[in-house]
């Protein structure tokens, strides 16, 4: 296949490109191209050359401002929103106006769509929740409408917590846990829906290859855990104690609004669409997933 990828330098983008060896891969970049496999675009200026994105078989859109870096000031929230909504709308609208549009458009989203839902079991059929991230994800997914109307098979990947030592939530947890300073967050009862990076990439390849898959797909493992269990399991894998809980007020003091949206929120999400397609998870259990992610880095 001839595949165009945005966010190629991110955690998922880099891993996906490695696994698509043998295919013809091009990257969307926000600077003047300095390699033949690069195509310039500018979500900020709402600019992309249609002639450069003609004739691709698939487009995978993964770009977006990090939601876990720094406190959520009004300016930070604006950047988070614009990088996702404006960028996805630019790309979706551009694809819809091509003479030779791609067959498939795979666009990132997140389980933030569901908001804070306590012990409720959530599938792709569940309604959206409340709050900044839920509202963002709803708008984010709506920006793919033009591509869908054009007849492009469009998949909205609702990513859970992706486990990899090189980036994402796990990379941020590792320093205190390695020092034996890890512990549950708040009361530890909030559900965490996670997925190994290897399973993310395998599922993305399934999205590229399966014509029947379209619409929202939850990218999570089939066994979500409460924060307290996640904490104990990570400590076990690292052979470290987990005796230092962080009270909810402390998390809110340190991280502000982001604390409730990312660290204290409870989302018990099931991968219903992946399971119905017969997807086989390589790492369905948390301990195995963490051990694999941290292979060679324990102790």
Image (cartoon, helix red, strand yellow):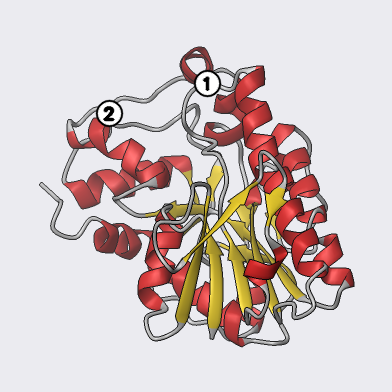
Q: Position of residue 183 (x, y in %)?
A: 34, 31
How many numbered marks have been drawn onto this rendered protein structure? 2
Q: Which mark is residue 71?
A: 1
Question: Residue at coordinates 29% horizontally, 32% vertically from top-left?
Answer: 182
Residue 116 seen in render? no
Say which of marks 2 and 1 sits in front.
1
Q: Which mark is residue 243?
A: 2
Q: Residue 120, relative to residue 13: is it above or below? A: above
* SS at badge 2: loop
Q: Residue 2, relative to residue 233: is it above or below? A: below
Q: Quadrant of residue 79?
A: top right
Residue 123 seen in render? yes
Q: Position of residue 85 (x, y in %)?
A: 73, 45
Q: Residues within 10 Å of mark 1 (few under 14, many from 20)?
A: some
Q: Residues within 10 Å of mark 2 (few under 14, many from 20)?
A: some
Q: Residue 93, relative to residue 246: is it above or below? A: below
- In the picture as drawn, the residue positioned furthest to the right comes out as 149
Question: Residue at coordinates 75% horizontally, 32% vertically from top-left?
Answer: 131
The one of 255 and 35 positioned closer to us in this rendering: 35
């Amino acid at each position: 296949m001839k595949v165009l990828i945005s966010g190629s330098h991110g955690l998922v983008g880099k891993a996906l490109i490695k696994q698509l060896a043998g295919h013809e891969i091009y990257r969307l970049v926000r600077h003047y191209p300095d390699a033949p496999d690069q195509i310039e675009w500018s979500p900020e200026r709402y600019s992309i050359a249609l002639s450069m994105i003609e004739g691709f078989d698939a487009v995978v859109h993964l770009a977006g401002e990090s939601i876990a870096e720094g406190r959520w000031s009004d300016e930070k929230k604006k950047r988070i929103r614009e990088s996702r909504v404006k960028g996805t709308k630019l790309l979706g609208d551009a694809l819809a106006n091509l003479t030779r549009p791609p067959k498939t458009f795979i666009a990132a989203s997140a389980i933030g769509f569901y908001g804070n839902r306590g012990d409720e079991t959530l599938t792709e059929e569940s309604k959206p929740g409340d709050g900044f991230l839920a509202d963002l994800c709803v708008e984010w997914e709506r920006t793919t409408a033009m591509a869908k109307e054009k007849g492009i098979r469009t998949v909205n990947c609702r990513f859970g917590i992706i486990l990899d030592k090189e980036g994402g939530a796990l990379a941020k947890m590792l320093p205190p846990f390695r020092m034996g300073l890890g512990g549950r967050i708040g009361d530890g009862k909030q559900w965490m829906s996670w997925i190994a990076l290897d399973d993310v990439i395998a599922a993305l390849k399934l999205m590229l290859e399966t014509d029947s898959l379209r619409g929202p797909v939850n990218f999570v493992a089939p066994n979500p855990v409460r924060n307290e269990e996640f904490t104990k399991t990570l400590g076990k894998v690292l052979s470290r104690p987990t005796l230092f809980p962080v009270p909810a007020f402390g998390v809110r003091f340190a991280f502000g609004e982001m604390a409730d949206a990312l660290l204290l929120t409870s989302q018990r999400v099931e991968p219903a669409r992946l399971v119905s397609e017969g997807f086989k998870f390589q790492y369905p259990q948390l301990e195995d997933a963490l051990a694999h992610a941290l292979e060679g880095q324990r102790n």
